[in-house]
Image: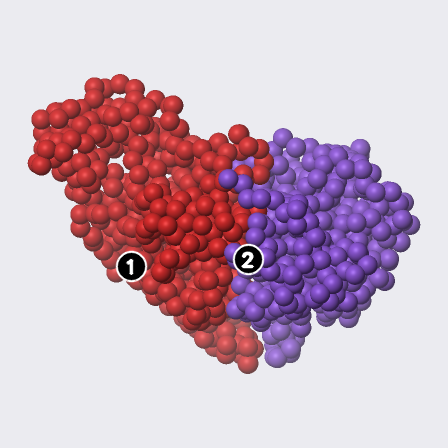
Chain colours: A purple, B red
């Protein structure tokens, strides 16, 4: 019953039309959905593509490297009979790859231990292990208030021009697991439509840190074809999964900038003349992004893990824009950067209120970090939110319109930004960060500290007050 | 069976040229891998099919085979504690056989064929048995008896019934003969179409609450057993945690948790956590009353569309046995988006925001499957539906939120600002409502010397006044408000902390029993009375806020164990002493 394969029509001609990144081919009987193809130009240079829709005789092909320079008559297609796949094997770390996964550093080809579909099947939820190992990032606002755990997907929502790249490379350098020294860690960095500078700066920083041999870089730069951006996060994650599940490593995947990815998705969707959903983005963008983000995680019985740190710039700093909105609905929280804090020179400029780490409850507390850690985080959030509200209020009624205790809370907000949030390039241990936070809370009247139990107040607050007055 | 040949494929949908007759909603197998699909449209000789599995590699020319019946769920002992995907493939068994990824074109039956169950007949041969009559029982878990009913086609005379003993689900346990002489065998295993509601006796309005143990829900916006609620909220506002909290602690007999297009880790956390949590009613693991449907965001989109029907059909199976079932669907929006995606691939004319015009009617059909009923055998039972809604940009005016609230009488609106301040549950007390308060009042009045309604309304009114006064305070400053108004603000803040806040991770306060809720509300209202009297005496309302007893009042959920009446009496006494001890403003200021 199997259809005749296309080996006898290896070099297929009969291209009817080209539009955007799409190529419309005739007489394609026997071609399968999502089958990968090579599109050959006059000089036999191959570009990668895949079949995205078929009817009895025709196929629509997305060409990842674009159609520039191709003609209808001289272009040929080779159908590969398989979905898009990638060779994975030893010694991928320390290497630089293009946005479609091919080595571009002049080094040897990857000796394939395995060939993997780049858009893998979904992880069976019954096989997942709930991520719960706290990772110390060295950043107070993350470690104390939005803790990251191994296998989490925690994006950075940023705005154009904000220091998200610096934050990502800081985390990549700082991350370590508490207690564990001999870690098989790795970083996979996927540049998606960013400038050469951004990618190069990251590489250099990791080099200065002597960590280059732990890193695999996948580069689709701003000047590279837009459609290729659909591949880049997928090949990077395929590499990460190999490192995690075949080499037992703990892999941190940085994807920057997912906004460029989504724009490429929109562009291709428009070429298909699909009915758009919000702001012209396709209705399936949620599912498409989920297929990327859900590749983070831990699997039962496997030693390695894939942790994702996607970065996206919110168009117009608008968190309700479909790109951050759909991402936030899929990822396990978000770290949001704020322009005001950035202007005031705070680094990292983390806007605490819209931040969230959904896996934090699993990763902190008694036996994991510190028994009082959850209450501390809740208390900080409660007072900081109050301080932000009072800040707004005082901009209308003036600080004199506030009650004395409100003024104390207002001052707490500012001090928290200066002493706790701002840390420049200092790496702080969790204990250090928590200590700063307790000190700040100790300056507040007790009726504000409703999130702390009487014992916690006794243990953490009164003792510090006593020290201070001594 | 009818066959067709694939002519066109676009993502999860395909068209095929038919030889033979297909019907709408007929289940089909597609291609050599026999992917599961369903007929969604017919036109001339063309059949349109949605495929519930990854379609990578399908080709024009592949075969589509009709299966003659619609998509069905398998029902029988062995459902409890299981995890299924949107088309009821058992994910644990699949994992054991095929590894870490969800396989394509492979399946195992949802229910274990080999396991034997202890069956006990309850009727004797020779009796006339109508549809829905209970003929026997299987003790499925410690808490749940699986009642074996006479299926629709098998009413008649009970000719034979098996003796007490162990039976596998496919073995017959009874035989009936219809008045026209047709003989039917009854086994523990049965099948039901997922798209159609199962028949019931009569339907009634809800009259007893589904106790959730969440104060803001039970006390302010209660849902009745057999009612429906929507739970809209932007990302991170607490929909999933609230749904999981309901799944853990609400007083339904059976929980159907449907993870529809959401995260894999959230499903994993249910599987990890529930077996270790005990059902307070029988001391058994909570997993034993729970069935989980997991079709996560990265799993095939058509199966996501099917998942809520699979879930509610299983819920109806337990309802028909006389149980109160809660269906917790997270999230209805992802289901609607699946509908939209498939409609878009078929190039149907969209209505609002790309959603097909039939979105509201499909939503209505789904929520209509909630209800308090008598079963065909006359027992009282119910299906309660709570559907989370994930509005884009947190905007509740979008189509799914707007339509869903039309069909559910409880609206539990989650508020971003509260969530950002880590005030949980972030249910907004002024945007939310319940249409069941009048019907459920009796039940609560019986538990609070007839004052429940009055106290509940008092708290709600206070919160309304607070909102108005805060707008004023924003202009003139809080200190400029008269004492009575500052008292309102102070009381509203205290009430909010004391009653509305409830930490789902707290050992003490994750669940608050009705008796404790009533006690808390009572002592809070007592405080209001005392505070009002004090302010009338000339006490400055702001002085109330710093009283040590007020801290206790605000933390009573956490700090008072259970509903120990002694602790509440002591708290009340302490309030009286503290307020009586307040001195008049002149002296307060000089201090
Ligand atoms: N009732 C609650 N008690 C304590 N924390 C909560 C509660 N509800 C939500 N949270 C916190 O908020 C986070 C996001 O909640 P979640 O239910 O996942 O949001 P949503 O499903 O609306 O996106 C959780 O990870 C948890 O930390
Ligand atoms: Mg959720």
Q: What kind of element bears circle 1?
A: loop
Classed neighbour count for the residue bearing mark 1: other residues with Cα under 10 Å, few (<14), some (14–19), many (≥20) = many
| Location of the N terminus of chain B (image quadrant) | top left
Q: Mark yes or no: residue A195 visible.
A: yes
- Which chain's residue wears label 2? A
In percent of width and height, residue A415 lies at 73, 62
In percent of width and height, residue B530 lies at 39, 61
Residue found farthest to the front: A8
Q: Which residue is mark 2?
A: A57
* Residue drawn at x 61%, y 77% as measured from the top left: A401
Q: What kind of element bears circle 2?
A: loop
* Residue drawn at x 46%, y 41% as measured from the top left: B34
Classed neighbour count for the residue bearing mark 2: other residues with Cα under 10 Å, few (<14), some (14–19), many (≥20) = some
Q: Which mark is residue B436?
A: 1
In percent of width and height, residue A446 lies at 60, 55
User: Which of the two marks, 2 or 1, is nearer to us in this view?
Assistant: 2
């Amino acid at each position: 019953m199997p259809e005749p394969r296309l080996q006898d029509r290896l070099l297929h001609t009969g291209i009817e039309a080209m539009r955007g990144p799409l190529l419309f081919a005739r007489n394609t009987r026997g071609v399968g959905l999502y089958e990968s193809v090579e599109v050959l130009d006059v000089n036999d240079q191959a570009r990668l593509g895949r079949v995205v829709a078929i009817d009895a005789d025709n196929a629509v092909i997305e060409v990842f490297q674009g159609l520039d320079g191709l003609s209808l008559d001289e272009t040929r297609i080779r159908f590969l009979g398989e979905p898009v796949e990638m060779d994975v094997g030893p010694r991928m770390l320390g290497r630089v790859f293009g946005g479609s996964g091919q080595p571009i550093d002049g080094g040897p080809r990857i000796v394939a231990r395995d060939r993997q579909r780049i858009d893998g099947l979904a992880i069976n939820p019954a096989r997942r292990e709930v991520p719960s190992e706290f990772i110390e990032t060295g950043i107070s606002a993350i470690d104390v208030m939005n803790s990251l755990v191994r296998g989490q997907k925690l994006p950075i929502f940023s705005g154009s021009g904000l220091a998200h790249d610096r934050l990502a490379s800081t985390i990549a350098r700082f991350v370590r697991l508490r207690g564990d020294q001999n870690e098989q860690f790795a970083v996979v960095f996927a540049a998606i439509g960013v400038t050469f500078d951004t990618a190069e700066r990251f590489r250099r920083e990791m080099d200065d840190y002597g960590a280059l041999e732990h890193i695999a870089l996948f580069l689709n730069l701003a000047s590279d074809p837009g459609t290729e951006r659909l591949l880049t996060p997928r090949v990077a994650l395929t590499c990460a999964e190999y490192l995690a599940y075949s080499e037992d490593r703990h892999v941190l995947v940085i994807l920057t900038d997912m906004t460029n990815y989504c724009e490429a998705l929109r562009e291709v969707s428009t070429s298909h003349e699909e009915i758009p959903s919000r702001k012209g983005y396709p209705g399936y963008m949620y599912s498409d992004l989920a297929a990327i983000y859900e590749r983070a995680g831990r699997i039962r019985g496997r030693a390695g893990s894939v942790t994702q740190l996607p970065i996206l710039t919110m168009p117009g700093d608008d968190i309700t824009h479909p790109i951050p909105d759909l991402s936030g609905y899929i990822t396990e929280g978000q770290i949001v950067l704020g322009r005001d804090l950035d202007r005031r020179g705070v680094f990292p400029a983390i806007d605490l209120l819209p931040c969230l780490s959904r896996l934090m409850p699993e990763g902190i507390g008694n036996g994991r970090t510190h028994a009082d850690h959850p209450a501390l985080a809740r208390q900080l959030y409660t007072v900081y939110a109050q301080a932000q509200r009072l800040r707004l209020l005082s901009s209308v009624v003036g600080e004199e319109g506030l009650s004395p205790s409100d003024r104390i809370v207002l001052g707490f907000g500012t001090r928290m930004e200066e002493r706790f949030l701002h840390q420049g390039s200092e790496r702080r241990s969790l204990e250090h960060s928590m200590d700063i936070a307790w000190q700040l809370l100790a300056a507040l009247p007790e009726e504000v500290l409703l999130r702390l139990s009487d014992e916690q107040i006794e243990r953490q607050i009164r003792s510090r007050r006593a020290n201070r007055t001594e | 069976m009818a066959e067709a040949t694939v002519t066109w494929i676009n993502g999860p949908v395909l068209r095929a040229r038919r030889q033979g007759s297909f019907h709408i909603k007929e289940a089909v197998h597609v291609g050599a891998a026999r992917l599961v699909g369903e007929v969604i449209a017919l036109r001339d000789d063309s059949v349109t099919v949605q495929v519930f599995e990854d379609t990578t590699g399908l080709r024009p020319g592949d075969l589509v085979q009709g299966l003659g019946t619609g998509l069905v769920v398998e029902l029988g002992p062995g459902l409890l504690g299981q995890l299924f995907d949107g088309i009821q493939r058992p994910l644990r068994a699949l994992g054991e056989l095929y590894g870490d990824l969800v396989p394509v074109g492979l399946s195992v039956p949802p229910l274990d064929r080999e396991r034997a169950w202890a069956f006990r007949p309850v009727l004797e041969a020779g009796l006339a048995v109508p549809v829905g009559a209970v003929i026997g029982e299987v003790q499925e878990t410690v808490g749940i008896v699986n009642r074996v009913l006479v299926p629709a086609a098998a009413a008649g005379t009970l000719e034979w019934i098996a003796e007490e003993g162990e039976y596998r689900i496919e073995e017959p346990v009874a035989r009936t003969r219809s008045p026209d002489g047709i003989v039917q065998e009854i086994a523990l295993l049965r099948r039901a179409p997922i798209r159609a509601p199962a028949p019931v006796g009569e339907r009634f309005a809800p009259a007893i609450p589904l106790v959730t143990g969440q104060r803001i829900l039970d006390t302010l916006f209660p849902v009745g057993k057999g009612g429906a609620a929507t739970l809209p909220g932007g990302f991170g506002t607490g929909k999933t945690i609230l749904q999981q909290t309901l799944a853990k602690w609400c007083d339904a007999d059976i929980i159907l948790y449907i993870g529809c297009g959401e995260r894999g880790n959230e499903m994993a956390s249910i599987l990890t956590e529930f077996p270790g949590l005990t059902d307070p009613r029988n001391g058994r693991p909570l997993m034993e009353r729970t069935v989980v449907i997991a079709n996560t965001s990265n799993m095939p989109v058509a199966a996501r569309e099917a998942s809520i029907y699979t879930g509610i059909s299983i819920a109806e199976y337990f309802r028909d046995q006389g149980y109160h079932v809660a269906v917790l669907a997270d999230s209805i929006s992802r289901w609607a988006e699946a509908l939209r995606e498939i409609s878009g691939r078929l190039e149907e004319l969209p209505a609002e925001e790309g959603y097909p015009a039939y979105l509201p009617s499909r939503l209505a059909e789904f929520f209509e499957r909630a209800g308090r009923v008598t079963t065909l055998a006359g027992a009282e039972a119910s299906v309660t539906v709570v559907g989370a809604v994930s509005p884009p940009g947190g905007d509740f005016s979008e189509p799914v939120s707007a339509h869903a609230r039309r069909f559910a009488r409880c609206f539990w609106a989650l508020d971003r600002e509260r969530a950002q301040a880590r005030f949980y549950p972030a249910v907004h007390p002024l945007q939310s409502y319940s249409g069941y308060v009048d019907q459920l009042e009796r039940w609560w009045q019986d538990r609070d010397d007839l004052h429940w309604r009055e106290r509940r309304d008092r708290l709600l009114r206070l919160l309304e006044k607070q909102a108005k006064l805060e707008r004023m305070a924003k202009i003139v400053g809080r200190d400029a408000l008269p004492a009575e108004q500052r008292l309102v603000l102070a009381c509203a803040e205290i009430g909010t902390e004391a009653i509305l806040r409830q930490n789902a991770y707290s050992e003490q306060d994750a669940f608050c029993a009705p008796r404790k809720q009533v006690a808390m509300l009572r002592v809070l209202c007592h405080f209001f009375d005392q505070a009002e009297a004090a302010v009338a005496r000339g006490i400055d309302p702001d002085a109330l806020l710093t009283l040590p007893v007020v801290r206790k009042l605000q933390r009573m959920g956490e700090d008072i164990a259970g509903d120990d009446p002694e602790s509440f009496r002591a708290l009340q006494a302490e309030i009286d002493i503290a307020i009586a001890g307040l001195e008049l403003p002149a002296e307060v200021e000089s201090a």
